[in-house]
């Protein structure tokens, strides 16, 4: 079961529209971003973020603290690098690439 992580700390369980997997278009809608970045997490999980929201102060989007914590050891490049905006955590098999 995938989860949508919002910057305000809200976590919502989500299902793909087709019942099987999330498409790129659907993930773009969920994250409000066209270009996506997949960040591998432990236990075959992936974090999906807008590729340009992982840059400090871009478009003044709110920092997503939970998503930033999940990627701190994997993808964060320094103390001023944050995940901004909405993010989706899902299993590797839940996304069609």
Image: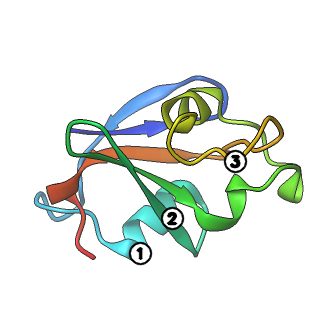
Q: Quadrant of residue 67?
A: top right
The secondary structure type at the circle numbered 3 is: loop
* Between discs 3 and 2, the one toward the N terminus: 2
The secondary structure type at the circle numbered 2 is: strand
The residue pinned by badge 3 equals 77
* Between discs 1 and 2, the one toward the N terminus: 1
* Between discs 1 and 3, the one toward the N terminus: 1
Image quadrant containing the C terminus = bottom left
Q: Distance between the Cα atoms at labels 1 and 2?
A: 13 Å
Considering depth in this image, is 16 or 41 the residue closer to the camera? 41
The residue pinned by badge 1 equals 25
Residue 19 drawn at (x, y percent)? 12, 57
| Position of 97 relative to 3 (above/below) | below
Considering depth in this image, is 20 or 90 the residue closer to the camera? 90
**Farthest-out residue, top:** 9
Q: Residue placed at 65% from the left, 35% from the top? A: 64
Image quadrant containing the N terminus = top left
């Amino acid at each position: 079961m995938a989860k949508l992580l919002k910057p305000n700390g809200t976590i919502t369980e989500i299902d793909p529209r087709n019942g099987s997997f999330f498409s790129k278009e659907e993930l773009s809608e969920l994250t409000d971003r066209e270009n996506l970045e997949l960040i591998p997490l432990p236990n075959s999980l992936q974090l999906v973020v807008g590729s340009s929201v992982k840059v400090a102060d871009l478009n003044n989007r709110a920092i997503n603290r939970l998503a930033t914590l999940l990627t701190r050891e994997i993808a964060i490049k320094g103390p001023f690098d944050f995940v901004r905006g909405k993010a989706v955590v899902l299993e590797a098999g839940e996304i069609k690439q």
